[in-house]
Amino acid sequence: MIIKTDKNLLIAYGDIWWGDGHYFVSHLSRLEAEYDNIEVRLYTPGGCVFDGDLIYNAINKSDNIEKLVIDGMAASMGAIIMVSHDNVEIVENGYVMIHAPSSGSYGNAKDKEAEAKLLRMMEKNFISKLMARTGKSRKFVEKWMDGSDHWLNAEECLELGLVSKIIPSIVKTARPIENPESMGNQEVYNMYASLLTYDFPTSKTEILNRNSNMKQPLITALGLVGFTAQSSDTAIIEAVQARITKAEAEKDDAEKKLKEYVKAQVKTVLDQHEGKTFEKEQRAVYENIGQTSGVDALMTVLGTASAKTQAPNVTSLIQNNGSDARADWDFDKWQKEDRKGLEAMAEKNPAQFNQLFNAKYNRD
């Protein structure tokens, strides 16, 4: 069941699955804390009796619900939920279907007898609620429990007392034109042509709602435990969001641990070389190299920093590098544009690397 809220409006559309009663109550409780004129709009073919009963009870006991509106259909368990409130409205093209509760079961004779007992108890409860709402006799209401589907239109619902009011199903003109004679053909065409666009779904909720076939692939791909293709859309959406949140948290934690690991490695290396390869006041420079370029690059730098080599010929270095465009690259440029190339230079051409490094950090 899709359950949404907008200010004081609570919308509940679709099949009633296991867990939907809980979601309905949680949304209603939140609205009750803010509004005392809540409007509930219902459209459902029915579903789970237990969760339907929870929705019925929540509506029935709430003092904050102003009215319940049937937006098209209240069938099976939906017809029972419909009588949970005194002020019930139904659209003029709405329909209600009443029948006896049913189920599918497996097991031995004892299991089936227990199932039948449960169905009889549910049926008795349905009859009691419908009698109280319509004022009809038990014999009259029991006819609705004969095993058939009994459909009622809006007028019949009003006559029986199942609803208190019939409201119009208003269709608004998408682009109203008050004076078409004053508009040219092209202007009218452009007005309506602007409607020929498709609003692509932007949120996970919209995507799931538009394609229920996505349920099982999502459940399988994400390894959602305790969910099936029959689970409610709301439950699956929340489970997916929880999995995404968890994955993001794990990613952040892994990145944090990696940074801490690299930091510890850099510290160990610098502790071993301080006073031998570089002085204490130079530590921040090497620490920055290790943090930005990695431990391997730092080791290379420390290895070449102590080597005394003659400054290389710039022209030959450019030729060896294979690119005239890099002739004027300094240490910062190499780090920004080709960090791996700089690391390779430190290993294969330490003279060139030393020249860039010494220029960067003002070393003779």
Image: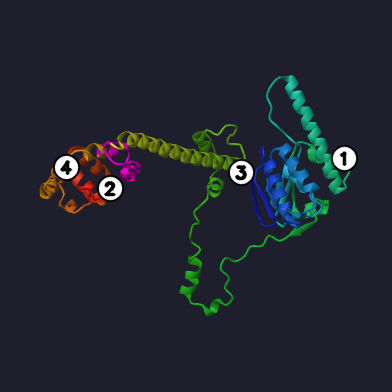
Are the two marked residues, 3 and 1, in contact with CB atoms closer than 8 angstroms? no
In front of the other: label 1 or label 4?
4
- Left or right: where 253 falls relative to 50: left
- Left or right: where 90 falls relative to 274: right
The answer to whether residue 56 is above or below residue 195 is above
- Left or right: where 233 falls relative to 306: right
User: Which stretch is magenta?
Assistant: 276-300
In front of the other: label 3 or label 1?
3
> The residue under label 2 is which amino acid type?
Gln
Please state the horizontal and vertical placement of residue 65, each as a whole percent of the image: 76, 53
> Does dot 1 land on a helix, a strand or a loop?
helix
Residue 335's label in the rendered image is 2
> Does dot 4 land on a helix, a strand or a loop?
helix
Let me know if residue 117 is in the magenta part. Answer: no
Question: In this view of the protein, which residue sits in the foreground, 216 or 38?
Answer: 38
Asked if one can make out residue 324 in the rendered structure from this viewpoint, the answer is yes
In front of the other: label 4 or label 3?
4
> Does dot 3 land on a helix, a strand or a loop?
helix
Specify which label sits upstream in the sequence, 1 or 2.
Answer: 1
> The residue under label 1 is which amino acid type?
Lys
Q: Kindly identify which residue carries mark 4.
A: 351
In front of the other: label 1 or label 2?
2
In front of the other: label 3 or label 2?
2
Residue 234's label in the rendered image is 3
**Alpha carbon distance from label 1 to label 2:** 88 Å
Image quadrant occupied by the N terminus? top right
> Does dot 2 land on a helix, a strand or a loop?
helix
**Alpha carbon distance from label 3 to label 1:** 40 Å
Please state the horizontal and vertical placement of residue 208, each as a whole percent of the image: 54, 45
Residue 139's label in the rendered image is 1
**Alpha carbon distance from label 4 to label 3:** 64 Å
> The residue under label 3 is which amino acid type?
Thr
